[in-house]
Amino acid sequence: MSKRGKMILATLLPAALNGCGGDGDLSPRPPEKTFGDHGLGPGQFVYPRALTVAPDGAVFAVDKYARIQRFKPDGTFEICWQMPEWLSGKPTGLGVDASGRLFVADTHYHRVMVFDRDGKELARFGSMGEEMGQFIFPTDVASDGDGNIYVAEYGGNDRITRFTPDFKPVASFGGQKTGEAELLRPQSIAFDAQWDLWVADACHHRICRFSREGRLLSRFGAMGTAPGQLQYPYGVAVRPDGTLLVCEFGNARLQHFDRNGKSLGCWGSPGREPGQLCAPWAVGIGGNGFVYVLDSGNNRVQMIKM
């Protein structure tokens, strides 16, 4: 590890080991199960950077070899396929709609690709640019109750664009010169049961909540290691009770919040052991009560029960 990396780790470690406190159900404990390790074989990863859970409980992940893998809810490997192009860069976001279609934020190809659960390509949309419907670096995809598709991106546009179910762009929000709503690398997006859109505004170290029409409803968070603070939140997921789970790339932890931004507890600390994390990128929630934490720097997924 570099001298700079050791200094950063020394800064983050005490806060992470001490936990966030709070009255939530993320007590420090080992995971219920872990799957994945480093490699190119089935069920292995080379720095995975996106994860999502389908309505049927299947878990999808993509790594820096542009391989998309599907797992059963218990972490058993099922199938793998590779993106059609990958030399320019690899995807950083995955989303699944109500019908089970997999949307891939093909980040460095400035597009979104759509697959069925077995890897058959169904559609693709987007191109490089700053116009409506174009992308610079798309980061994540989510769909609402009417089948509209929302795509987050960074690299200059730093916005969220809403598309119709047949992939026509109709509106965008969170971009430059939008005041308090202005985003800086919206890395992850997720809808709640009321169809409000929660955004991990990574480089502002905060979480934002928008209406489907793009109106900023609330926001919370500031850079730091204390309870309620964030460092590069890369993943956000909404629990059935409406509370949030936020995966912090910079703090190497998973933090639980209520809808008003009160910290309810933390899980994880920097390291390589079970229950520790290294550069986590994403979090997903399964219908089986499990939470899936993409422990990217350790090339694995850790499963905890909530």
Image (cartoon, helix red, strand yellow):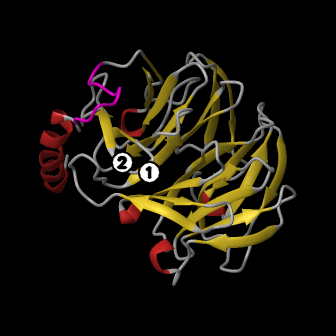
Q: Are marks 1 and 2 in contact (CB under 8 Å)?
A: yes
The kind of secondary structure element at disc 1 is strand
**Dominant secondary-structure state across the stretch colored magenta:** loop
> Is 139 inside the magenta-drawn segment?
no
Residue occupying the point 76% across, 32% down: 117
In the rendered view, tell whether residue 139 sits above or below residue 293.
below
Report the residue that reaches farthest toward the bottom.
177
What's the residue type where badge 2 is placed?
A: Phe
Q: Which mark is residue 234?
A: 1
> Looking at the image, which is closer to me, 115 or 192?
192
In the rendered view, tell whether residue 81 sits above or below residue 160.
above
Q: Position of residue 161 (x, y in %)?
A: 68, 67
Determine the CA span between mark 1 and mark 2: 6 Å
211 vs 31, left or right, is right
Q: Position of residue 250 (x, y in %)?
A: 30, 50
148 vs 269, left or right, is right
Circle 2 sits on which residue? 249
What's the residue type where badge 1 is placed?
A: Tyr
99 vs 66, left or right, is right
Residue occupying the point 45% across, 69% down: 184
Q: Is residue 86 visible?
A: no
Part of the protein shown in magenta:
21-29
Q: Position of residue 244 (x, y in %)?
A: 46, 41
In the rendered view, tell whether residue 157 sits above or below residue 107.
below
Residue occupying the point 18% across, 46% down: 12
242 vs 12, left or right, is right
Q: Position of residue 284 (x, y in %)?
A: 53, 35
Quadrant location of residue 88? bottom right
The kind of secondary structure element at disc 2 is loop
Quadrant location of residue 76? top right
